[in-house]
Amino acid sequence: QHVEVRLVSELGDNQHVEVRLVRELGGNQHVELTLGRELGKELAGNQHVEVRSGKELAGNQHVEVRLVRELAGNQHVEVRLVRELGGNQHVEVRLGKELAGNQHVEVRLGKELAGNQHVEVRSGKELAGNQHVEVRSGKELAGNQHVEVRSGKELAGNQHVEVRLGKELAGNQHVEVRSGKELAGNQHVEVRLVRELAGNQHVEVRLGKELGENQHVEVRLVRELGDNQELGGNQHFKVSLGRELGGNQHVEVRLGRELAGNQHVEVRLGKELAGNQHVEVRSGKELAGNQHVELRLVRELAGNQHVEVRLGKELAGNQHFEVRLGKELAGNQHVEVRLGKELAGNQHVEVRLVRELAWNQHVEVRLVRELGGNQHVELTLGRELVFEPAC
């Protein structure tokens, strides 16, 4: 199974920490555990479960806390029950009662949910503090764009905040927009400030100034950045045209060659990649190791749709892959596949088979045949799907 296990004592403030303590785990399930004592009992099936039992958490740490009891079935469930949480930690909290079915459900303070629907529910009133909040207040939205909108005021502290203040958005673009000012500390921040965006482009934009060390930062639209600029520290960066990167930093790189080390790297057109690094690669050859790889090989794509395409052959091992148009996939890897045949094992699979899609919409379509096992599958049998623009 894909397991990340950590056992950390005496955690300081502001650290980005994922902690897991797994005991007696059975099956190929994808499990994230944190500060769990006697956690992992009576778990049955290969379900994708994130479980955390965190008590007396203090500080601004990035924490995902879940306390799941009597889970039955292979459903993909994220459940959280948090008590006595203090500080500005990154917390996703859910209190779900009477959940039934195998639905993929993200619920907050939701009661009496029934059915297999994919539901995101939010009931946020009078939110106070620096909590991680996803709020949507979308008015006058035009077009078929995939938009997450947030209207956050008076945000203070080092919280992990995703904020969107999008006005006059035109087109079907997939846009994440953030307008963050006066950010201080080493917080995990995604900031975007987009102005005068035209067209259907997929844009992630960041304008970060006076960034400290070691913070988990995704920054785009950087000024005075030159090629090969000797990035130092373990900070989480998104960098383009970076060569000779050293250290274990979490790096997203495009057109990167001779990358060495176990760093978390997103690379496009990368050759001679070695090591177990977390890598996102497009059109990559000679990939070796169990690294986390995203591959893309796009041919004859028309329209401005947000598409991730992969053409992977002879993939072996239990690595975490996202693959499209993949044949002969074997192992229990976490796989996103389109047009995938002969899939075996209980892997977490997203499969799509899209034909004759029109209008640049953000569509996830799947047509799965001969799938065996209890894998987490999102299925849609869409043929000749045509969507008219809402505007």
Image: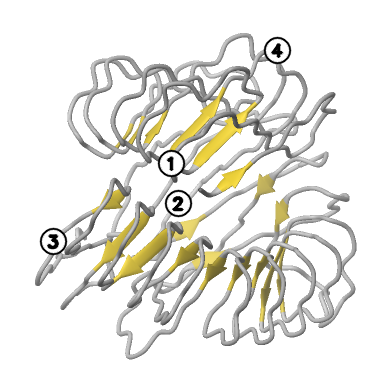
113 up-or-down from 239: above or below: above
Disc 1 secondary structure class? loop
**Residue 278 in the image, given as x and y percentages of width and height:** 64, 63
Residue 329 figure quarter: bottom left
Secondary structure under the numbered disc 3 in the rendered image? loop
Q: What residue would you read off at disc 1?
A: 27
Near mark 3 (Cα within 10 A), the count class, few <14, some 14-19 or many ≥20, is few
User: Which residue does the numbered mark 4 point to in the structure image?
Assistant: 56
Q: Answer yes or no: do the residues labelled 3 and 2 have beta carbons within 8 Å? A: no
What residue does disc 2 label? 167
From the viewer's perspective, is the residue at label 2 or at label 4 nearer?
Answer: 4
Going from N to C along the chain, the mark reached first, 2 or 4, is 4
Q: Secondary structure at mark 4?
A: loop
Q: Residue at x 37, y 27 (%)?
A: 107
Scheme of image coloration: secondary structure
Does 28 sit left or right of 183 as displayed?
left
- The Cα atoms of the two marked residues, 3 and 4, are separated by 46 Å
In this view of the protein, can residue 233 be seen by the observer?
A: yes
Question: Label 4 crowding class (10 Å Cα cut-off): few <14, some 14-19, many 20+?
Answer: few
Separation of marks 3 and 2 at Cα, in angstroms: 35 Å
Q: Position of residue 79 (x, y in %)?
A: 43, 25
Q: Which element is circle 2 on?
A: loop
Q: Tag 1: residue type? A: Gly
Mark in front: 3 vs 2: 3
Residue at 74% over, 39% down: 16
Query: What type is the residue that disc 3 sits on?
Result: Leu
Pick whichever of labels 3 and 2 is earlier in the sequence: 2
Q: Nearer the viewer, residue 305 or 145?
A: 305
Q: Is residue 171 visible?
A: no
Alpha-carbon distance for marks 1 and 4? 31 Å
Left-right relation of 68 to 364? right
To which residue does mark 3 refer?
381
